[in-house]
Image: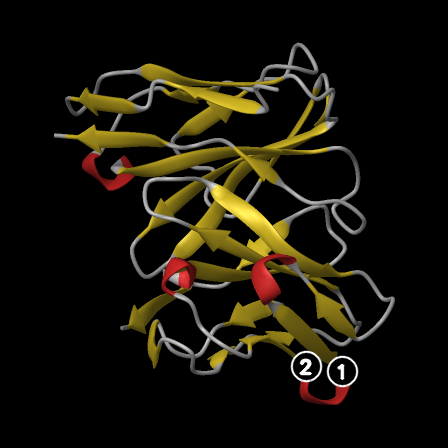
Amino acid sequence: NAGVTQTPKFQVLKTGQSMTLQCAQDMNHEYMSWYRQDPGMGLRLIHYSVGAGITDQGEVPNGYNVSRSTTEDFPLRLLSAAPSQTSVYFCASSPGGLNTGELFFGEGSRLTVL
Amino acid sequence: AQSVTQLGSHVSVSEGALVLLRCNYSSSVPPYLFWYVQYPNQGLQLLLKYTSAATLVKGINGFEAEFKKSETSFHLTKPSAHMSDAAEYFCAVDFGNEKLTFGTGTRLTIIP
């Protein structure tokens, strides 16, 4: 099983450029989410979705957009990249409510903004 | 405010010694609690979870954690550390709002 697949694994951007981090899962999970990981700060939730057509903001949503047109895909868009968005990004999915399930993580996408 | 605190960003133990990683949360209602492990250049994977059943939870690789409501704690332990346990460990809490809140992580180093 592929599980949660993130692309690209590495990306370098210049300030002001836009890009999309792709996330796809093949487990038919309703819940999907994006986190960023920064040293000393753990993982912080950017956006999440409880099903196709439904998205909501997490702890640090500014500068990021998401959409959920299908159950499988949950892309994260950076409209105008800033150096503060240099980070490792993780996509994660869950079969249902977090209280009985667990998050399944992708391997991460390392983004550097110059 | 609801929060998760992991005491000690770095912990070093000798091979064969007890591993104790601390996690405390702030909430008036017992939440759902998780421990995740992250090996270098990988995503996180679940070690164990507490979902209001037994207060002592056993996970993979010999780890276990005990939920103590009176102390609002969910500390992770392993009786005997192995070199392969070197990784970063994250405590995470679901406060019932469809969001998993993570602690800042503890990097575990095993001394041969």
Kind of residue indicated by mark 2:
Thr
Instruction: Name the residue furthest bottom.
Output: B70
What colour scheme was applied to this rendering of the protein?
secondary structure
* In this rendering, position of residue B3 left or right of residue A14: right
Q: Residue furthest right?
A: B53
Above-or-below relation of B13 to A41: below
In the rendered view of the protein, which quadrant contains the C terminus of chain B? Answer: bottom left
Residue A41: x percent and y percent?
A: 37, 58
Q: Report the residue at 70% width, 16% height from top.
A: A71
Residue A79 percent across, percent down from the top left: 35, 19
**Which residue corresponds to mark 1?**
B69
Tell me, yes or no, if residue B94 can be seen here: no
Left or right position of B103 against B32: left
In this orientation, which residue lies closer to the viewer: B30 or A15?
Answer: B30
Q: Check disc 2 and report the residue beneath it.
A: B72
Are tags 2 and 1 found on a single chain? yes
At numbered mark 1, what does the secondary structure look like: helix, strand or loop? helix
Please name the residue shown 32% across and 61% down the image.
Answer: A40
Label 1 packing within 10 angstroms: few (<14), some (14-19), many (20+):
some
Which subunit holds the residue at mark 2?
Answer: B
Task: Give the percent coordinates (x, y) of residue B49.
Answer: 70, 59
Say if mark 2 contacts mark 1, CB within 8 Å.
yes
Q: Which is nearer the eye, B91 or B95?
A: B91
